[in-house]
Structure formats: structure tokens, C-alpha cells
Amino acid sequence: MVSLRPHLARVAADERRRASYRRICNTYYTFCDLLACPPSNAISLAPWGKRVYDRAHEMTLRRFFLVLLLGLVLAQTVASATEASSLLASWFARQPNIQTWSADFIQTRTLKSLTQPLTATGHVWFAEPNHFRWELGHPPRTIALRATNELLVIYPLLKRVERFPLTGNQTGQWRDALALLEAGFPRSQADIESRFRILSQTVSNQICELSLQPRSTSARQMMPLLKIAPDPLATALRHLPHGPEFRFLDRLLSLDPGKSGSGEYTVRGDEPFLRGHFPGQPVFPGVLLVEAAAQLAGVIAQTDPEIPPLPGLKLTALRAVKILGAAKPGDVLRLEARITGRLANLVQARATVTVNGRVVLQGELTLSGQPDSTAA
């Protein structure tokens, strides 16, 4: 009697290899579709009767996909690192022009006796050359304030104040940790590396997050890890010289510095001018639609990484402006602008304002700043 087991085993092994080959080919075609490139004629899903299965062919395909996947991973890693470096370079380039800054922060403390870390939120303000206020909690439970030659740590609930000298050669946890705030924020990559070790850099939605560790041993006891995430969109809004009463740009949605951007303004309904425009039927004035578009165009122009901000930049001319609709309280203005040209202290832009997808304004704007007195 002849046993069929060896034959059946070979058939099963061949079928497994064929299924593996089909999976590899399907994956290959998927990659070709994603990369928008034509597939090679050397790889076929033709019936097995028309193609002799080759184990070496399968191994070649496996090596090809391994190299391809590794290349994609490395490319993504390099792209992320390049993007992080680009964002940081752009951010540091603007630091010398910043005299004040503020930031929200989250304090996280890990205690051995607790399974979950303790977190608290706060806010910090800084102004050149060395003025800062640091508040923890809402309402504040701890306030750190720099006086002339000392640091005041205030505990409002306890009605207690602690004093720490900031002159001479005194050292200590508070002195070393808060000296980082006393000096403001680093102005360059070299400056930041002199005070911190950069543990990691990650980029998400154009926000680069840095994980920093103070170099001072005593400072690390108070602040073992510091994470900062400078938001380029929030930073760009600081270029608006207008006061809150005449600011018609609540937030930026996107920004290609010096080129284009988009933002939003919500018509709240409590704006003073709406009481007279018109009584009982408030309508956002068309001229302020133009102003909102000009403010966005100004922010885009002032963030150009290759051109210093123009002092006194303001709207000076309009061309082909059409007001095609109106906005009422509760409406959200979607603003879009693109810089179309620059010449010396003049900036040309094209802008559009929409409400619920409906265009209410479009036109061309000209902004001008004070001429550069240092130019030849």
C-alpha cells in the first residue's frame, strides 16, 4: 500500500507558499497605489499554471518590502527631525524681538505613597529684563514673585510669605530652579543647551514639544523635567498691535509664515458698535470685515522668517473689494489671506471672508509699514 501522507504534506506546503506569495503581491500593489507608481511586470498574480513558484522570488520580495518599510520609517524620522529643527529655528529667530511672554503650565508631581500623579495648572508671566510672576492653582494657592533682590513665595490661603535672596553666591533648590525663570527664556539653541539637556523633540500639528532637564543638580530636585510646547499660531497673534476692543481675529487656524494663513472671529453680539448698527437688528459692519481680513494679512506678513517685522504696519489701500453678505451675532467669520507681493515696506495681499461657507467679502489689500531707515 502506498501512503498519500508525504504527497498531501507537499501539496499543503505548496498551498501555504502560494498564499504567502499572493499576500506579498497584494501588499506590493497596495504600495504602488499609495505611491502612485506603476507596478513592476516582474510581479504577477497570474494563475499558478502560468507562473512557476520560486521560493527565491518570495524571499526577494520579502527583502524588498523590508527595505521599503525601513526606508519609509527612516524617512518619516528624518522628516520629523527636520520639521522640529525648522520650527525651533523659526521660533528662536523671533525670540530677540520678544520683551514679554506668558504661558499656561501643568505641574505634575509623583509621590511614592500615591498610585496616580498629582497635577495642578497655573500661569507664568515674564517681562524683560527679569520680572516674572508664577501662579499655581485657580484661584492661586502659591504665587512666586520676583522683587528687587529676592524671590517672594506667597501662600494666600495660609497668609504666609517666604523670602529667598537672588543676589550673591547663595545656592539652593529654589534659587537654582527659579533662576531659570529669572533669566527669562533662552534666546538660542546654544542658550537653551547651556541650561538644559534636551531629552526629546516631538512635533504635532506644527507644535514642537521639547522635553528638558535642568543641568543644575539642585534645580532638578525642584524641577526634574520641564516640557515646553511653543505654539507658533498663538505666538504669531502677538504681532497684532490692536487692543482687545478692536481686534477681529480670535485665533489662527493655519499659518504658512510670510505666505498664507487662516483664522476665525466670532461675532459675540456685545460689541459696542452693534448697538447702533443697527438698533434692534445688529449687523457686523462691512468695513470691519475688511479690517478683520487686513489684521490676518498683517499677521501673516509680520511672521515672514526672512523679512524682519515692519514697524507701524497698517492698511493703506483697497482694490476690487466686494462685500457680498453680512454677519450677525453668533456667526463665525472664517478669514483667509495670502500674500501676493512685497516691495520695500509695502505688502500686497488677497483675502476672503466666509460665514457658514458663504463668501461675504473678497478683495485685495495693501499694507504699508515705516520704511527701513537703515536701508542704503
Image (cartoon, grey):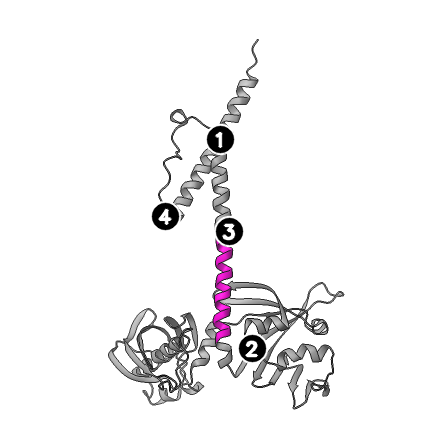
Q: What stretch is highlighted in magenta?
A: 73-93
Q: Alpha-carbon distance for marks 3 and 4? A: 19 Å
| Disc 2 target residue | 103
| Disc 1 target residue | 56
Mark 4 and mark 1 lie on one chain; the one further toward the N terminus is 4
Quadrant in which residue 361 is drawn = bottom left
Crowd around label 1: few <14 · some 14–19 · many ≥20 (10 Å): few
* Number of numbered markers: 4
Quadrant in which residue 258 is drawn = bottom left
Mark 2 and mark 1 lie on one chain; the one further toward the N terminus is 1
Crowd around label 2: few <14 · some 14–19 · many ≥20 (10 Å): few
Q: Residue furthest front?
A: 376
Q: Going by the image, does 102 lie left or right of 237?
A: right
Q: Alpha-carbon distance for marks 4 and 1? A: 27 Å
Q: Determine whether 209 is above or below 292 in the image.
A: above
Quadrant the C terminus occupies:
bottom left
Q: Give, as a three-letter code, the residue at label 3.
A: Val
Indicate the secondary structure of the residue bearing disc 2: strand
Give the residue at x 66% y 79%.
Answer: 178
Mark 2 and mark 3 lie on one chain; the one further toward the N terminus is 3
Q: Alpha-carbon distance for marks 2 and 3? A: 34 Å
Reply yes or no: does residue 79 show up in magenta: yes
- Counting from the top left corner in percent of width and height, residue 335 is at 36, 74
Q: Which of marks 2 and 1 is in front?
A: 1
Q: Main secondary structure of the magenta part?
A: helix
Q: Going by the image, does 240 lie left or right of 101?
A: left
Reply yes or no: does residue 256 show up in magenta: no
Give the residue at x 36% y 71%.
Answer: 259
- Counting from the top left corner in percent of width and height, residue 243 is at 44, 87
Mark 2 and mark 4 lie on one chain; the one further toward the N terminus is 4
